Amino acid sequence: MRTTQILPGFLSLVLLFSGNLSPQSAPPATTQTPTNGAGSNPGAIAPQDTQSSPLALKVTTRLVMVSVVARDKKGHIVADLQAPDFQVKEDGQEQKVSVFSFQHPGTGEALAPVPLKLPPNVFRNALRYEPNRALNVILLDALNTNLLNQAYVRVEMVKFLDKLPQGQPIAIFVMGRKLQMLQDFTTDLTLLKKVIQTAKKESSHVMSDPSGTSEVPMTLQGIADQQVAELAPQFRAQIQDFEQQNISGQSDVRIQYTVAALTSLARMLAGYPGRKNLIWLSESIPIGIYPDVKNAMRGVPGSGNVADMRDQLGPDSTPSIKNGPGSRHEYVDQLTLLSNLLADAQVSVYPTDARGLLGPAFFNVSTPMNGQSGAGGLASRVEGRQAEELFQAHYNMRDIAEKTGGLAFYNRNDLDTAVRNGIDDGSTYYAIGYYPANKDWDGQFRKIQVAVTRPGVKLRYRLGYFAVDRAEYSRRHPEQKDIDFGAALNPDYPISTAVQFEVGIVPPGPGEAKIKVNYALDPHLLTFELGVDGLQRAQIDCAVRVFRPKDISHPVRTEATRINATLKPEVYDKIGRTYFPCQLMFELEPGKYFMRMAVRDNGSGLLGSVNAEFTMPDVKATASTESH
């Protein structure tokens, strides 16, 4: 990785983008300091630069946004509240409301996608859709849902789209081995139905019964289990222990894939303003989104703690609030990061059970009774296992819904109506923002309490966030930055929009062998820190991963650079009026290429990415032709 220094007083202008990009003025000149081996490994990012800025005075101000759904006793929307009607507290301390607005669909049509008209070899990850209402994301969970229930979900989704009014912006994603975007935000219902109908079903690789038909049990059943228990109890215990280890391993893998997919989705949605309603159609959610929910939510009325959940779900055994039964890890840091990403992106989750309403396990075709008439207590064990699995699944659904301000739908056979209810619920809300009075980012969970002066109004909103010091988190988990950046450079992941930029690819000129990849980052989305010396500092990573168009699984080259910017006030002001620059230069063989560009603001951890196609000309052949 190269390290680029933007010097404090170096303000001479250099036109890096050859007039291709939209900013009206060029960035300040930069100096390049190469490190050994840049770009030599096509599949990896170069080691991280550890340069620090001892003079930096860290002043962090964060705006906490909370979307609040207000309804009366009859469940009707309360639409006439004003800012003075609200009181916002954080950990019991009243906060000053700095942002307030009432958001509703209105009667007009939703805005159409914004067309991108860019010059050749210029690409941009700017938002393709500028919403004037809440956005809706339908997540088809193929990772945690068997094939039978996936087919049922698709039928219900077509029914839902048949009844949906025009003007609702919807995007469709599927979560399997990776997160895939089937359709970007659109209001075209015909297109959405086509996407749902043609989407391929994917067999889960982490479920013990991915087909949804009769499950083959790993342990002995019925009379065989009774006989082994009497004749070889140690052997029976070993079989049961093996089954538990297998369940634990499957649970861990499911959690890892689910967290990775939700993290990628949150980063993709981060650039869009306002509330996003995530309609998550799943058979089972394997995680509780808040890792320390017992301590975090204790004593908060209506907060979805254990007592509240038991009132709603029944008096079964106390659920595990970590990450589901059999999980060997707690994933505390990963879940903390994910919960904050969802909060920052203003995502409210609406989990919907893809199984519909389940009957007794004895009559379910997927139960392993196999006509043994319940011998050896098999019927009672199967019933008990299904009850436990349902309780845990519904608990996790309700948990993530309440903690993000959404609703959970389960024990119902009208999935199409449930999805419609979720979209309707999240379409009208109050957007409230405040700058926390407590500036100590100690990593603890902070409870948010919102109240109104008008009696009889029920409020629903996300119940808090973790006050994570992002710089400290990065120091504690340096591997996470590589994981996140690697995902941003993976073409299989949706593009990220939290950091928006434009990039131009400049072919080699006469007598040159290298192409230039020039980035122009929106400076208003970057984090600058003002030092005691009056200089503004920022650290930005820029990278490109190059593939052959027919093989995007194996990169042929990866180039990256890190910019440590130390800016005088006049340079900082100029960048604020134009863009923040970054440049990569490297050689390529002639031919067609697919590229994935990504940037990362190390001050905030936010990412941006975009795809590009480029044809490298045969410079030698061109030079030979011109010489003749």
Image (tube, helix red, strand yellow):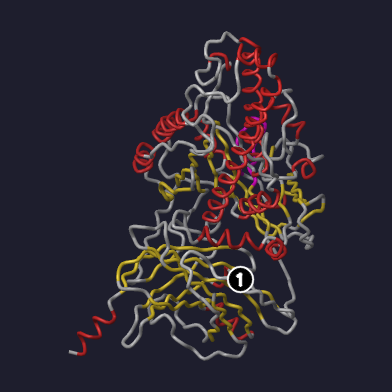
217 or 602: nearer the viewer? 217
Q: Quadrant location of residue 457?
A: top right
Residue 77 is one of the magenta-drawn residues: yes
Q: Residue at x 47, y 83 (%)?
A: 26
533 or 106: nearer the viewer? 533
Residue 392 is one of the magenta-drawn residues: no
96 or 308: nearer the viewer? 308
76 or 329: nearer the viewer? 329
Secondary-structure class at tag 1: loop
Measured as percent of width and height from the top left, residue 137 is found at: 50, 45
Measured as percent of width and height from the top left, residue 401 is found at: 63, 39
The relative height of residue 227 versus residue 348 in the rendered view (above or below) is above
Q: Residue at x 64, y 26 (%)?
A: 239
The relative height of residue 431 versus residue 626 in the rendered view (above or below) is above
- The stretch in magenta equals 68-79
Measured as percent of width and height from the top left, residue 220 is found at: 60, 20
